Amino acid sequence: MAQQPDEPSIEAGAHTPWTANSTDSPILPEDLLLLLFQPESGVIAGENTLFYVLAGAVLADLALHESVAMTTTRTGSVNVEAVREKAPPSDEILLSAWEYVSEKPRGVQTVLAAIGPRLRHPLLERLIARGDIRRENRKVLGFFNTTVLEDSQNGRRAVLLKEVRDVLVDSTEPTPRIAALAALLWASRALPQFDPYIPWNTAVIKRAQELEHGNWGAGATSEAVTRTMTAVIINSVISTAAVASPNQ
């Protein structure tokens, strides 16, 4: 299929590397996809709206590193634009999104729809290459080959899940990254699938909604701009996902 004019390229350009995090470190959408992977069944939770949620995680990652900013138009809509004063991201997935919004300011939901559809495959391949998920080939009925995904048991998913649980269940004050991750997990509408480890109850829902609106805790006062941007992104994910899959 020919690339559409507004479709961002996934090719990394020749830019000064972004030094805010190591290129070997998992980016936020990788962590989110790893959490959404269900080891018991080998499937990814929330497939119906997954690309909106992963795209939201890309934008949230850029917001956490202050590589994008939000502007309000005269009509009251919110646009996202690249911050050019900082070096572009070195990670090719984040760079692709950054380059897309660097062309011109775009509405958050426009960005979600443009960058989201092509994220699942490369993110999953990264998780497999990193050793967080295993891909196994099996025979069904002794004849048909099939591919299944399994937990690698390296412990990284368990650590992430505990950090999210600490925030949602025990009200531990999160780091900005874990706050965004927990809020995105809520936005994915897959949180009930983590019960009973993360109980699906009123207290957890209330805490998730607080994170959704940027209420991360007293220690996050200095993160006001980032919290606001992340809240806008996550609310856009929620509203877009609700329209895309109203009965989920």
Image (cartoon, rainbow, N blue to C red):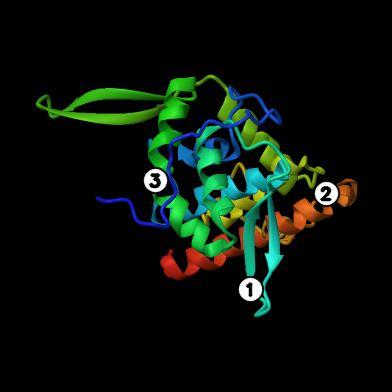
Residue position marked by numbered label 1 in the rendering: 77
Foreground mark, 3 or 1, reads 1
Q: Secondary structure at mark 2?
A: helix
Q: Secondary structure at mark 1?
A: loop
**Left or right: 218 as drawn, with respect to 193:** right
Q: Residue at x 31, y 30 (%)?
A: 148
Amino acid marked by disc 3: Arg
Distance Cα–Cα, label 2 vs label 3: 30 Å
Report if residue 111 is visible in the image: yes
Q: Quadrant of residue 41?
A: top left
Question: Does 202 appear above or below 126?
Answer: below
**Left or right: 111 as drawn, with respect to 73:** left
**Left or right: 20 as drawn, with respect to 151:** right
Residue lying farthest left? Answer: 143
Report if residue 194 is visible in the image: no
User: Where residue 193 is drawn, which disc sits there?
Assistant: none
Residue position marked by numbered label 2 in the rendering: 223
Question: Does 248 appear above or below 75?
Answer: above
Q: Quadrant of the C terminus?
A: bottom left
Residue position marked by numbered label 3 in the rendering: 118
Amino acid marked by disc 2: Glu
**Left or right: 135 as drawn, with respect to 155:** left
Q: Nearer the viewer, residue 185 or 62?
A: 62
